[in-house]
Image: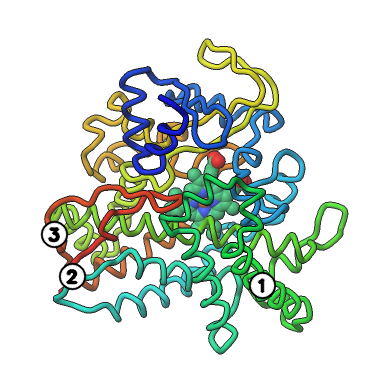
Amino acid sequence: MHRAIQTAIWSRQAQWLLSQSRRRLGSMFTLEIAYEGKWVVVADPDLIKQVFTGDPKVFHAGEGNDVLRPLLGEHSLLTLDEAAHMSQRKLLLPSFHGRRMAGYEATMREIAAREIESWPTGVPYRLRPRMQVMTLEIIIETVFGVHGGARLDELRAALRDFLDMLTNPRMIVPILGLGPDRLRSYPPFRRRVDRVARLILGEIAERRAAADLEERDDILSLLVAARHEDGSPMSDAEIHDELLTLLVAGHETTATALAWAVERLVRHPDKLARLRDEVRAGEDAYLTATIQETLRLRPVIVIVIRRLTEAIELGGYELPAGVNVVPSIHLVHRDPTIYPEPDRFRPERFLEAPPGTYTWIPFGGGVRRCLGAAFAQQEMAIVLRELAARWTIRPADPAAERPFRRAITETPRHNAEVILS
Ligand code: HEM
């Protein structure tokens, strides 16, 4: 197919394009999308392991995320490679360690309970936008450390407006079409990016001057206190870019995963009932398995990208420098040799066998594995627990919702519409 046709299909039906290509071409094939170089899609876990554990100097993920650079900046963890990437990743890692994660739990629970309590009963209600409200609120409190007041309202409004632009399905055309450099000067884009930057820089300045920095446990405060290996603090630009990265990487993804969890559960009342019973009994095993199965069957992101800086051999093929090697999350998760009846929603499969490092990859892998994987799963568990324990939920329409592409993530077409009682 011509590159333009592949791009058009990719932007609407990425999963279909991946599955059809595997059916016709096998577990390794080439796609050509938009202005990107060649993608060599890989669906075999052994080869994906080679890619994830390969030399970060050869497998560049940051370069593969070029499209995000005008949004997130030069210092974003997502767009850096090699030593620069490792150095930022080390500064961010402590924010996601166990003790810190436990500290975010109460905030997550409070926000989830307040939000879920406010939902209407007896009428069709779309949960995906509400999940986004919740994940945004959780990030503003745990990452930015802003609680209440006019500043919170202003920051929330600016972030909302910025994120709405990104997730607007119509934005995929300028994002893919203009390319990173021209996108930067596209006025609707520029205006929102500048407003968010002004507010974030204001928060950073305030935090640098705060007397209680040591006692604060939000991520912004941790970054203000963090030091590079040579003892120097992070610059305003670095902190700005990482905060925005956490926001963009963590907000819509988690909200979408939650929307899918509900979308699947309400169409499997026996599984929803089991979840509710176990959650009420204080058991978490089925809850964890439900989250794992949701992320397997409806991975929010269907591929990850590594751009080669030198030629390699992979799966018996010579791949030249410049090619993008693309492990396909979607294809691995639907491989019937790994997951019998791969299209069925069956959390029980993860009670029978735990997920494998290279066969369950909703968060990617290797030195680029999602920094927020534990954060996201904790948040999902808290929200689903609150939801299942409190409400009886049924679908507004019995037909399953199909995946729908919203700029970067794949969301339920009708936004997980349910009726609560
Ligand atoms: C269900 C929710 C989420 C999913 C499915 C998800 C998925 C992913 C994936 C597939 C990657 C790329 C991994 C790779 O290239 O191998 C990634 C990277 C990343 N994610 Fe997540 N993510 C989620 C939530 C979050 C949250 C909540 C945060 C932060 C609060 C976050 C922060 C990041 C960051 C910073 C990276 C870049 C890591 C690096 O390049 O070193 N994500 N995520």
Q: How busy is the neighbourhood of tag 2: few (under 14 within 10 Å), some, or many (20 plus)?
A: some
Q: Nearer the viewer, residue 86 or 65?
A: 65
Vertical relation: 316 (above or below) 417: above
Left or right, 286 with respect to 3, comes to: left
Q: Which residue is mark 2?
A: 124
Question: What is the spatial separation of the Cα atoms under label 1 and label 3, in whole angstroms?
Answer: 41 Å
The amino acid type found where label 2 is placed reads Pro
The circle on residue 394 is: none
Residue that appears at 48% across and 31% down: 327
Residue 162 in view of the camera: yes
Vertical relation: 197 (above or below) 22: below
Question: What is the spatial separation of the Cα atoms under label 2 and label 3, in whole angstroms?
Answer: 9 Å
- How many circles with numbers are drawn on the protein? 3
Pointer 1 residue Cβ closer than 8 Å to ligand 1: no
Q: Which residue is mark 3?
A: 397
Q: Position of residue 381 (x, y in %)?
A: 37, 60
Residue that appears at 69% across and 27% down: 309
Mark 2 lies on a secondary structure that is: strand
